[in-house]
């Protein structure tokens, strides 16, 4: 096996606590064998990479209380 098939990816997503947690864990679209899922994952990766710095900034601001 070269990467994650649908079943293994589904297991990993459940184990990690959701798609965003799995993205944070580090599974990348290149790791996914299924082309359709890899394409969707790539889209999610792109959005996650844009959103993550904003989340970090919000968390920093909230710690300033």
Image: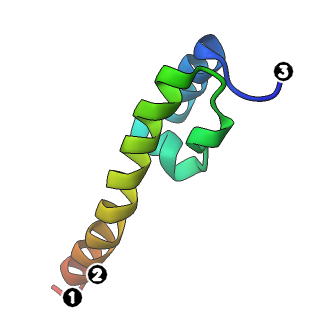
| Alpha-carbon span between mark 1 and mark 3 | 47 Å
Question: Quarter of the image containing the C terminus?
Answer: bottom left
Kindly indicate the quadrant of the structure image that contains residue 49.
Answer: bottom left
User: In which quarter of the view is residue 48 placed?
Assistant: bottom left
Residue under the point 58% across and 48% down: 25
Which residue ends up furthest to the bottom in the rendered image? Answer: 64
Q: Which is in the foreground here, disc 1 or disc 3? A: 3
Residue bearing the label numbered 3: 1
Q: Which residue corresponds to the image point at 26% horizontal and 71% vertical from the top-left?
A: 54
Q: Residue at x 28, y 81 (%)?
A: 60
**Residue neighbourhood size for the residue with mark 1, other residues' Cα within 10 Å, grouped as few (<14), some (14–19), many (≥20):** few
Circles 2, 1 touching at the beta carbon (< 8 Å): yes
Q: Which residue is most to the right?
A: 1
For label 2, the SS is: helix
Q: From the image, tell me which residue sits under label 2.
A: 60
Q: CA distance from mark 2 to mark 1?
A: 7 Å
Q: Position of residue 46 (x, y in %)?
A: 39, 53
Picture disc at residue 17:
none
């Amino acid at each position: 096996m070269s990467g994650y098939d649908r079943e293994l990816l589904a297991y990993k997503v459940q184990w990690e606590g959701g798609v965003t947690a799995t993205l944070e864990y580090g599974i990348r679209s290149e790791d996914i064998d299924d082309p359709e899922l890899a394409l969707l994952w790539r889209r999610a990766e792109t959005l996650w990479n844009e959103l993550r710095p904003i989340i970090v900034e919000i968390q920093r601001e909230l710690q300033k209380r």
